[in-house]
């Protein structure tokens, strides 16, 4: 963690890699983790990298039962090769509790004010949240 109060801990590239335009590549971190039962590790983008580069870190989940190497999925949406250098901070990891739901097949759902509106359905005419 870079600062007290940070939710995410930095994840760093363990080796140099080139990501071609329109390529998704898994960048190794050199880490393996043992996450407690009832938790997951969320791999999230770094806001600075998303704003300043053509590379987007893809969201990911590391389950508590996984013991393999930790990699970070990165997508280069730019027109030029992007080089990830060994030691670059490429993502952040957030430890979060998990809950198992009880999924049921039903014939109908209860009514709500929102109903089935989604994907911008709460925007008003000015394009702002209602």
Image (cartoon, rainbow, N blue to C red):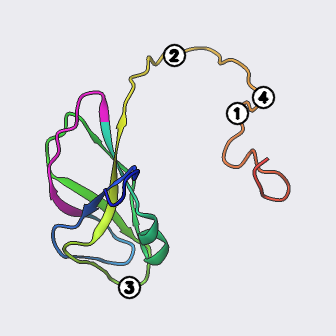
Magenta-tinted stretch: 27-39
Tag nearer the camera, 4 or 2:
4
Report the residue at 24% width, 28% height from top.
37
- Foreground residue among 95 and 83: 95
Instruction: Report x, y in % for residue 92.
Output: 34, 57
Between residues 108 and 13, which one lies in front from this camera angle?
Answer: 13
Disc 2, SS: loop
Task: Name the mark on residue 116.
Answer: 1
- Please give the residue where the numbered disc 3 appears in the rendered image: 80
Could you say whether the residue bearing mark 3 is in a helix, strand or loop?
Answer: loop
Q: Earlier in the sequence, mark 1 or mark 3?
A: 3
- Assess disc 2: are there few (<14), some (14-19) or many (≥20) residues with their C-alpha within 10 Å of its C-alpha: few
Query: Where is residue 85 shown, x and y percent of the image?
Result: 23, 77
Report which residue position mark 2 lands on. 105
**What is the CA distance from the residue labelled 2 to the residue labelled 3?**
48 Å
Name which quarter of the figure residue 72 lies in.
Answer: bottom left
* Label 2 vs 1, first from the N-terminus: 2
Q: Tell me which label, 2 or 3, sits earlier in the chain.
A: 3
Q: Give the spatial CA distance, label 2 vs label 1.
A: 18 Å
Mark 4 or mark 2, earlier in chain: 2
Q: Residue at x 23, y 57 (%)?
A: 71
Residue 45 falls in image quadrant: bottom left
Separation of residues labelled 1 and 3 (CA atoms): 41 Å
Q: In percent of the image, x 39 and y 25: which residue is there?
A: 99
């Amino acid at each position: 963690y870079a600062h007290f109060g940070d939710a995410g801990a930095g994840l760093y590239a363990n080796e140099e890699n080139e990501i071609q335009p329109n390529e998704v590549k898994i960048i190794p971190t050199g880490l393996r983790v043992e996450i407690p039962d009832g938790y997951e590790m969320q791999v999230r983008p770094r806001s600075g990298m998303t704003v300043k580069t053509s590379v987007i870190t893809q969201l990911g989940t590391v389950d508590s039962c996984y013991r393999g190497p930790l990699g970070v999925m990165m997508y280069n949406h730019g027109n030029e090769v992007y080089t990830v250098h060994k030691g670059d901070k490429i993502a952040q990891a957030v430890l979060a509790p998990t809950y198992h739901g009880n999924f049921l097949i039903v014939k109908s759902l209860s009514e709500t004010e929102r109903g089935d509106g989604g994907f911008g359905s709460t925007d008003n005419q000015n394009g702002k949240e209602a």
